[in-house]
Image: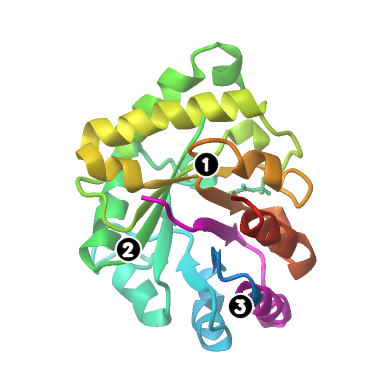
């Protein structure tokens, strides 16, 4: 099944209300480029404002708790995020796995919590630099993904994000991206059968306007998860445009 490229901005812990100027400019660009599915995951504090301020892009959250409610000070459930206006949630980002000690089992539970209320999920996986240097990156990431996947694949995307490429300006060889995405596709079809072929696998890690076309052209790259370059329309729109220009 051929699907639109999915270009998602992860704003991380960036963005006050003043950043809505950028979100609205990105929204206008998305309206002009309907071949591409565009979304932003702002900080949770900006979800409701962004949902009201944009029309042509999805709005998502960067994390959710796996429980519906309860004694979890400072956390937000998937239901709360959806009520605020989030249509999807990113789970298992390497920064959360590192900073909050999230395990593969936690990531799976969070993905299932979101799916249970029909939210989209972007599930992140990726290797460290030492793991890449060991020559075992494909096996390691395949194992991480298999252990993190929810039981069903409805509204699921996967993001392959080599940790050493996030925010560093370093990008893997295109051949390494191709090999990893091929390997992750087999993990998805092993788990979900034919439906696993339709799960989009995004690439993330220092995607910019000047490297997006090359990365998006790789077989089995169904879009991009973009950090730093998604914070401004000047940085993000060229990536969306590069996706629109792919055959
Ligand atoms: C990310 O953290 O998801 C990411 C891909 O960041 P950057 O684009 O800044 O490397």
| Element assignment for label 1 | loop
Which of label 1 and label 2 is nearer to you? 1
Please tell me how crowded label 1 is: few (under 14), some (14-19), or many (20+) other residues with Cα within 10 Å: many
| Res. 107 in view | no
Residue sitting at the far bottom: 52
144 up-or-down from 31: above or below? above
> Which numbered disc flags the more N-terminal residue, 1 or 2?
2
Residue at 51% over, 77% down: 47
Q: Which mark is residue 72?
A: 2
Q: Quadrant of residue 195?
A: top left
Does residue 83 sit above or below 3 in this rendering? below
Residue 91 counted in the magenta span: no
- Measuring from the top left, give residue 38's x and y in whole percent: 55, 66
Horizontal side of residue 171 vs 157, given as left or right: right
Does residue 227 lie above or below 11 as drawn?
above
- The residue shown at (58%, 36%) is 218
What SS does tag 3 mark?
A: helix
According to the picture, the residue beneath numbered tag 1 turns out to be: 221
Q: Quadrant of residue 204?
A: top right
State which mark lies toward you, 3 or 2.
3
Position in image of residue 19 (x %, y %) = 70, 77
**Cα–Cα span, label 1 and label 2:** 36 Å
Q: Is residue 68 left or right of residue 87?
A: left
How far apart are the two marked residues, 1 and 3, measured between alpha carbons? 23 Å
For image coordinates 32% across by 30% down, the residue present is 187
The segment highlighted magenta reads 1-30
Q: Position of residue 222 (x, y in %)?
A: 50, 47
Residue tagged 3: 31
- Magenta segment includes 19: yes
């Amino acid at each position: 099944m051929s699907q639109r490229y999915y270009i998602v901005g992860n704003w991380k812990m960036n963005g006050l209300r003043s950043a809505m100027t950028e979100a609205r400019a990105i929204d206008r660009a998305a309206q002009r480029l309907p071949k591409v599915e565009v979304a932003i995951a702002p900080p949770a504090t900006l979800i409701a404002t962004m949902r009201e301020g944009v029309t042509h892009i999805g709005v998502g959250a960067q994390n959710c708790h796996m429980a519906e409610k309860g004694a979890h000070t400072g956390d937000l459930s998937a239901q709360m995020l959806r009520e605020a206006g989030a249509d999807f949630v990113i789970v298992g980002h390497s920064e959360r796995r590192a900073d909050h000690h999230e395990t593969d089992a936690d990531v799976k539970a969070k993905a299932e919590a979101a799916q249970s209320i029909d939210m989209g999920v972007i599930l992140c996986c990726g290797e460290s630099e030492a793991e890449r240097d060991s020559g075992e990156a494909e096996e390691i990431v395949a194992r991480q993904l298999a252990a993190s996947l929810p039981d069903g694949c409805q509204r699921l995307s996967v993001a392959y994000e080599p940790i050493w490429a996030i925010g560093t300006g370093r990008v893997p060889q295109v051949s390494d991206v191709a090999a990893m995405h091929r390997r992750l596709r087999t993990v998805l079809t092993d788990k979900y059968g034919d439906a696993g072929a339709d799960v989009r696998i995004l690439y993330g890690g220092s995607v910019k306007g000047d490297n997006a076309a090359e990365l998006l052209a790789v077989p089995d790259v169904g879009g991009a998860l973009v950090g730093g370059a998604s914070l401004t329309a000047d940085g993000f729109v060229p990536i969306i445009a590069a996706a629109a220009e792919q055959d």
